[in-house]
Amino acid sequence: MRDRTRYLYLAVIVAVLLGILVGFIWPDVGKELKPLGTGFVALIQMVIGPIIFCTIVLGIGSVRQAAQVGKVGGLALGYFIVMSTVALVIGLAVGNVIDPGSGLQLTDTARQAAEAEAAKGADASTVDFLLGIIPKTVVSALTDGSVLQALLVALLTGFALQAMGPKGAPILRGVEHFQRLVFRVLAMIMWAAPVGAFGAMAAVVGATGIEALKSLAIIMIAFYVTCVLFVGVVLGALLWAVARINLWSLLSYLGREFLLILSTSSSETALPRLIAKMEHLGVSKTVAGITVPTGYSFNLDGTAIYLTMATLFIASATGSPLEFGEQVALLLFMMIASKGAAGVTGAGLATLAGGLQAHRPELVDGVGLIVGIDRFMSEARALTNFAGNAVATVLVGTWTGEFDRERAGRVLAGQAPFDEATLLDDPDDTPAAEGPRGEPEKEMSPA
């Protein structure tokens, strides 16, 4: 069957351009279209919990030895900590060198906007974050929209099924069928992407206008350039050194996901597709099922760069520069507070305001300086976070021996196209004999 989804993504591009046009010409109309974008993101978030649950349960439950899961999780978390630290250092270096906030002045409007954002993040604390991982019920973890809660329940369920041995096989079979159902629902939702992209872009352009972009061009350009260099130089070199995979080939393979993130300004909308595409690329179900969802909460390269540069920008703009020790302490707090919210549009801004409120209250007013362009910076954050998680999944798969490089070569060369209709590799399709790592599939039920 022909891939009709190519028309969908062309429609997304057209919708984004039309949204920008409407926002500039009729800003009031553009702002009224915001619910279209909000509704589309809400539809995506509706299936995030079930998809994470199914993917992790299948990945863990099908592994005979729990030690393999622990090895994958340990390597992933260790890598996430190292790379977040690298991103933090890069952001600090760039922010201190360019000093982007010098010469700016606060306005009453900026102060009011900052107060609103501070209210969102002021109550955040490490204790609240840790307690928030525990859901009220097993079922609520799949309905409350918390990635970490779904991750916890999925891990417990996967290990429980693993301990049940052959008796857990029927349950795993049922979870597999449910996963296929959820992915079908997601594929249906994706046809609403042009409408969501149009509403989101019209709203942000209508609310912001061109003047805010001009006045804050330095911080925006510096942030985008820093993100591009981090992905192209740091992640690209690491990916080639470890897995011998060309970064640009991998990013091209994920081009539709990047377009989706760009139009919605949220990396969470592409989480299910990233899991499916990593498995299709040759990463095992276990590695993809653990590394991708965990990375969405702990591998926040783009968010780390944003928080560092935005903090230094605000401190400079308000005439209250931070000492180096203050910079490190404040930003470490923000990185902890931001866990679990990286895929949510605007979460970085709330984290920034909350961290400043807790450590340097006199700087909170400065958050209003970047409220107008946070949406545009949020796109770069989301794209960088997404690229970082894609690379991390391949690296962890390589380190654990759960990555088929030969299959990846065929996929990246276009010889094994991804099934856009189901988002899954159907064992009944041709070539039918290949599993997620190019190995023969074990007996499975028909889709």
Image (cartoon, rainbow, N blue to C red):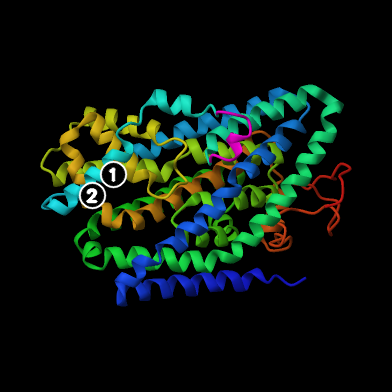
Q: Outermost residue toward the right?
A: 443
In this rendering, the answer to whether 179 lies above or below 7 is: above
Q: Position of residue 211 (x, y in %)?
A: 21, 66
Q: Amino acid at mark 2?
A: Ala
How many residues crowd around disc 2 within 10 Å: few (fewer than 14), some, or many (20 or more)?
A: some
In this rendering, the answer to whether 215 lies above or below 183 is: below
How many residues crowd around disc 1 within 10 Å: few (fewer than 14), some, or many (20 or more)?
A: many
Residue 117 got which mark?
Answer: 1
The structure residue drawn at horizontal position 71% and vertical position 32%, both measured from the top left corner, is 60
Give the main secondary structure, helix, strand or loop, of the magenta stretch: loop
Q: Position of 60 compared to 123: left or right?
A: right
Question: In the image, which residues are magenta?
Answer: 136-144
In this rendering, the answer to whether 181 lies above or below 413 is: above
In this rendering, the answer to whether 99 lies above or below 122 is: below
**Residue highlighted by disc 2:** 113
The structure residue drawn at horizontal position 84% and vertical position 33%, both measured from the top left corner, is 169
Q: Position of residue 311 (x, y in %)?
A: 25, 41
Residue 143 is inside the magenta segment: yes
What is the number of callouts on the image?
A: 2
- Distance Cα–Cα, label 1 vs label 2: 7 Å
